[in-house]
Image (cartoon, coloured by chain):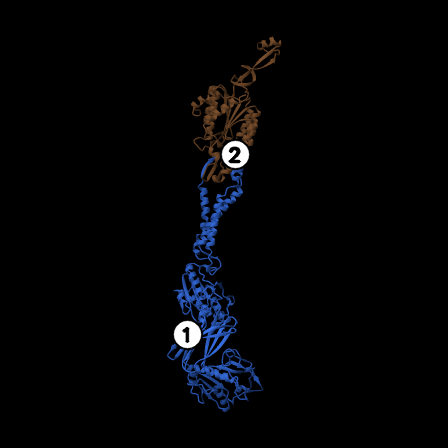
Chain colours: A brown, B blue
Amino acid sequence: MDRLVDPQVAMRLANTPLAARQAMLGHMSGRHQSPHRGSSVEFAEYRKYVPGDDTRRVDWRVYGRSDRFYIKEFEADTNLRLCLVMDTSGSMAFGSGSITKWDYAKRLAATLAHLAIGQGDAAGLYAGGPKLHCAIPPSRRPTHYMALNTALQEMEPVAETGLTDHLHQLAEEIPQRALVVLISDLLDDPNKIIDCWQHLRFRKHDLAVFQISDPEERSLDLNQPMRFIDLEGDDAIVAEPELIQERYRAAVARHSAALQAGVAQCQIDFHEVSTDEDYEQVLVRFLTQRLGIQG
Amino acid sequence: MAFLQPALLYALPAVLIPLIIHLLHRRRFQEKSWGAMRFLREALEEKRGRRKVRHWIVLAMRMLAVAMLIVAMSRPLIGGWLAGWAGSGDRSITIVMDRSTSMERKLPGGLTKREIALHTLTETLSQVNPSEVWLLDQPLHKYSNLATQFSPTDAKADLPAMLMKAFQNWTRTQQTNGEIWIASDLQATSWRAEDAAAWADVEAAYSKLDSGPTLRVLSIQGGKPNRSIRCEMDQRQLIVTIQQETAATQTIPVTLKQGDQTTNKDVTLSGKTTTLTLDMPSEGVVIGEISLPEDGNARDNTTHFVFANETRPTVAIVCENPNVEALLSLAVSPTSAVDITREATWQDEALIIWQGRTPDTNEMDAYLAEGGQLLVIPDEQAATKTSEPGLPIMHWSQDEGPLRDTRSGESLPLHNLRTFRHTTVTGDTLASLATAPWLSKENGTYFLATLPLTSWSTLGEGPILLPLVQRLLTEGQKRFSQVHVREAGQAPWQAGIWPNANGWDITVRPVAEDDPKEARVSSLGNLPFQEFAMEAKPQGNDALNEWWRPILFLGLLFLLAEGLLTRMPSPKRSITSAA
């Protein structure tokens, strides 16, 4: 086991499967519902026999009662393809405590990948931006996890965010219905972010979003004048936090409210996460909520 | 604006301290990498204009507070007694103090003008801390103690002369940076307001100074209602004159002290001037004083007199014409109280009336120098000019001389006199016909152009001849008197009776001191006087019109405003709470 995933946490989370909220399209048999009919034990529906159907699938009991040929269909189970989309913008490097947003995001991503691959689903990793591009397609091979893990370890947040462009690109590139998990601080224009979400939803992807934030970043709880240097560029702002604290918090609240409006509009699985929260609890909440609304 | 401590203004650059602190504070900002810059920008852009303005206002308040503190410590003067004072430690001050009798007049506060001036000057000097102080009076002093130096006097002041003396001292001591402070009640006679020639000299002297001193006039005018009294001794009569400022009729008690006897007498004053004639004992020495009740000026309420045993006067009438001699004898001694001789000794005579050319001897010169009077009348053989209808006297000196007006102000009837024949006389003209002098004075000798004969003039009728001769006799007799009257000034400075080996000296208050007319500083030449009119109360620091208190208060207001602006909640806070 590597540093990104705590084995104890992984062991405890293994009891709670990662479920999709909607039918998935997969090539392999799995535990997730498929839009197609398959060979599981779960009854789906009856339909009339048409020439060419396998006669072995005719329900003879119904024929005995109704003198008509009906085919009995069962639900198909398929595997889930988890697409982890990491925000590698410079702002993710911020951390007021012992852990940065990026570190926190990596832990979430690694643990989710570990869970998915561990339950036989495929997991992939996407990250993009002007200076970094990573696209590891989902795979269910156990060794694939090591590749994801290595990629996560090597990635560092740099430069300006190119998240929204990257999300639009991914919405088009991911060919089948997948569980897209976006891990980001979402410090961008809310309208652009919501556009991305709509695009992904339009492409039938199950979208889950972890908005990672730092407590200090939310509250601006600083008591001396500061020269704030932009993590995504060379810009600097001199300000007295005490004087602008209220307006800053109001700006944060407005941004959050705008995102929440997008969440309701796009019906996405949205989780606000603070870096001072235990990531295991965050994942437990995420997994159990998904189980509760599974289709 | 002037400052009492201008050196402290060098600290004015300290107003930059808040700005420097601000800049240093900015430099000392801790750097912090930050991700959520969009929220910072949003927070800063909101109301940025107003906030920025408020920020600069706060900074301005701090700088102004420091500036006000420094200005207050520099003790600014706005207007007031020392307006325009550019004083520093190397500035000298010459104090010209008018301590004439009129300066002893009390103001409603109870203090005299001199006391108020001294108080103000003392307080001011203690504040401005000059390099040296000169007190100008008689003589010139360096600063010791104002109060004792400038004691009250019964003398008059001569401000033009004092200023000239101040300018001489300025040049002699090579002063280059200083001021001359003049404390006065602006009495016109003290300032010789109508003597344009004197002020022209002062102006010329001032213009010659290398760096002219600032001339400040501390004027103290007005005062409590006042009366004054003075007296003249005329043979054995005391002529008392009481002056008051109004023409109201009122009765006041007058105290007459003769030797050890004191008597009170009610006197009714009518008009501005009231004259009393008091008969004194015909013989013996009478020393006394006469006083008014207390009023605005205590120093002009008493006048002194001495009547001594006078010797019988002798008059020599050296005349060829017996008719002329008879007329002159009658005019000289209508009551036979005068010894008349026909020979002049040039020693014992009070008056010598000489017809024709005078001997021009040393004895005569000595006689005139000692105060003897000599009236020269024309020789009948001298060349004359005649005028049948008789020439009238066109002009004569009514203020002084033997043809002056009477004590009650009436003119001698010279306009009735006619001159049919006259000679030519030289010297200073005291009376003149239309084309020639009638009476003149030269080298102490009076020259009359006509004779008291009917063929010469109507002078022999008496109304002119009698007072003319009697006044000359009185004047000539003074040198034999045991009592000498002179104005106070020099030493002693006080009015009073001063016995000496030959009799008594009486020092009296100058007549000019009783003239209440005040001068206007602006009309005194073209000197750059800066006048400050004092109020009727002691003024020390108040007269300086210091403004450090209001300015310090203003500084505190700036600090208060700074505090309020710093603590004032931002508009956004209310919006947030409303949301």
Does residue B143 lie above or below B497 as drawn?
above
**Could you tell me if residue B370 is visible in this image?**
no
Q: Residue at x 48, y 89 (%)?
A: B319
Closest to the observer, B131 or A37: A37
Q: Amino acid at mark 2?
A: Ala
Which of A250 and B206 lies nearest the eye of the viewer?
Answer: A250
In which chain is the residue bearing label 1?
B
The chain containing the residue under callout 2 comes to A
Q: Quadrant of the C terminus of chain B?
A: top right
The mark lying in front, picked from 1 and 2, is 1
In the figure, B408 relative to A194: above or below?
Answer: below
Whole-percent x, y for residue B44 in the image = 51, 39
| Residue wearing tag 2 | A253
- Please tell me how crowded label 2 is: few (under 14), some (14-19), or many (20+) other residues with Cα within 10 Å: some
For residue B27, which quarter of the picture?
A: top left
The amino acid at mark 1 is: Gly
The vertical placement of B515 against A86, above or below, is below
Q: Position of residue B214 (x, y in %)?
A: 46, 63
CA gap between label 1 and label 2 equals 101 Å
- The residue sitting at the left extreme is B501
Res. B96 image quadrant: bottom left
Checking the image for residue B496, the label placed there is 1
Tell me residue B203's x, y (percent).
49, 68
The reply to whether residue B462 is in sight is yes
Query: Residue B413: x and y, percent?
Result: 54, 82
Q: Which element carries disc 1, helix, strand or loop?
A: strand
Q: Are marks 1 and 2 in contact (CB under 8 Å)?
A: no
